[in-house]
Amino acid sequence: MRKIMLLNAKGGCGKSTLATNLASYYASQGRAVVIADFDRQGSSMEWLEARPRDRPPIRGIAAWRDTARVPRSTDYVIMDVPAGAHGPDLTALVRRAQTLIIPVLPSPTDIRAAAHFIHEMLLVGKIVRDETRVAVVANRVRENSSIQNTMESVLNSLSISYSTLNTQIYHNLERFLSRLRIPFIATLRESQNYLVADARGLGIFDLTHSQVARDIEQWEPLLKWIESKRSIPEPAR
């Protein structure tokens, strides 16, 4: 049974969106999937309530209220964790997972907050002891917007590449993660497809492929990492 947790101390970074889409992917592959929602807002549970019955089933547990008892037949447990977890609460949550995925928004404030949060998790000790593996995902990265196009034109006139500038936004975080041997796995764009899917209790993997081909392509590095040995803790000796 794989136990994957989406978490970040800062709210609004897209934890629930990644959790529901990850769950929908594995359900579409015929796997037995459970979403354990630890957030009292219950975003993942509301998503499940909206999910059509003709779609691959996903079981939900309101873990903030009920005991998170997962059936042994479950292949994947996707855990959606609330923002603001620190100290003993963070320790208790991290101990539930094998794999941690931290979504980070492309802003200096969010990147600094993520660095502090990762540092706190390392103090918990589990990651250092290889009991948990962690990776970071850049989320809601804007592309092809009018603002971006304008900025790109201005920077090009100054012989500065916009793509280089966009990469530099993450430079400090990447350097920080590299020192800790934590991978920066994928970059997911800001896309209306996530909103369309979410409103219907679906993930992008449930939508017409031609509509979401670009989004699915961006998920491939993350899915590949999750299925690799690099994302699975070494067995205790």
Image: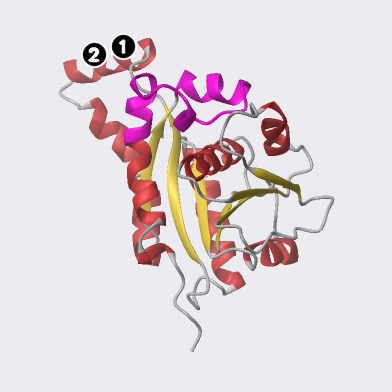
Residue name at image x 51 percent, y 84 percent? 236
User: Colour scheme in the image?
Assistant: secondary structure
Residue name at image x 57 percent, y 74 percent? 125
Residue 174's label in the rendered image is: none
Q: Position of residue 83 (x, y in %)?
A: 68, 46
Task: Rate crowding at label 2 as few (under 14), some (14 to 19) or many (20 or more) other CA atoms within 10 Å.
Answer: some
Q: Magenta span: helix, strand or loop, mainly?
A: helix
Do the residues bearing badges 1 and 2 touch, measured as CB atoms within 8 Å? yes
On screen, residue 64 versus residue 6, left or right, reads right
Residue name at image x 33 percent, y 20 percent? 210
Q: The residue under label 2 is which amino acid type?
A: Ser
**Disc 1 target residue:** 150
The span shown in magenta is: 191-217
- What's the distance in space between the residues labelled 1 and 2, CA to CA? 5 Å
Q: Position of residue 101 (x, y in %)?
A: 50, 52
Query: Of 111 and 66, which appears nearest the observer?
Result: 66
Residue 113 position (above or below residue 69): above
Q: Is residue 197 magenta?
A: yes
Q: Is residue 11 magenta?
A: no
On screen, residue 192 versus residue 68, left or right, reads left
Secondary element type, mark 2: helix
Residue name at image x 50 percent, y 78 percent? 129
Q: Position of residue 160 (x, y in %)?
A: 19, 26
On screen, residue 89 versus residue 54, left or right, reads right
**Residue 185 makes an appearance in the image:** no
On screen, residue 63 versus residue 196, left or right, reads right
Residue 153's label in the rendered image is: 2
Instruction: State the quadrant of the N terminus.
Output: bottom right
Q: The residue under label 1 is which amino acid type?
A: Thr
